[in-house]
Amino acid sequence: MVAISEKARGNGIGILLLNEVEHLAKTMQITKINLAVVDTNQSAQKLYERYDYIIKKELTSGYQ
């Protein structure tokens, strides 16, 4: 599990992590990436949707 603290959000860290995960997946010939997001983390949901990820299920609890 990877999470970004609320204080650090909005600084581009999520985009960097997402880009790195996608790069590693391509390198390892992985064709599917699953992400989990807590329903209260609207900024992460928007980030994933901006990168064309589809939210299929939201977690109802998690780290804050």
Image: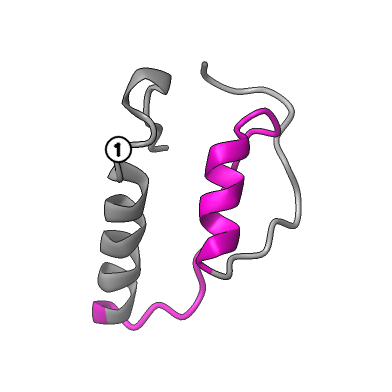
Residue 40 appears anywhere in the view: yes
Against 1, residue 18 (above or below) is below
At 30% from the left and 45% from the top, the residue drawn is 12
Against 19, residue 23 (above or below) is below
Against 36, residue 4 (above or below) is above
Against 55, residue 27 (above or below) is below
Residue that label 1 marks: 11
Answer with the quarter of the image where residue 39 lies: top right
Answer with the quarter of the image where residue 9 lies: top left
Residue 45 located left or right of residue 30: right
Which range is magenta? 27-51
Question: Where residue 53 appears, x then y in whole percent?
Answer: 59, 65
Kind of residue at disc 1: Asn
At 75% from the left and 57% from the top, the residue drawn is 56
Residue 19 located left or right of residue 51: left
At 33% from the left and 72% from the top, the residue drawn is 25
Front residue (pair 29, 51) = 51
Front residue (pair 40, 60) = 40
Q: Tell me how the rendering is colored.
A: one colour
Q: Is residue 4 magenta?
A: no
Indicate the secondary structure of the residue bearing disc 1. Answer: loop
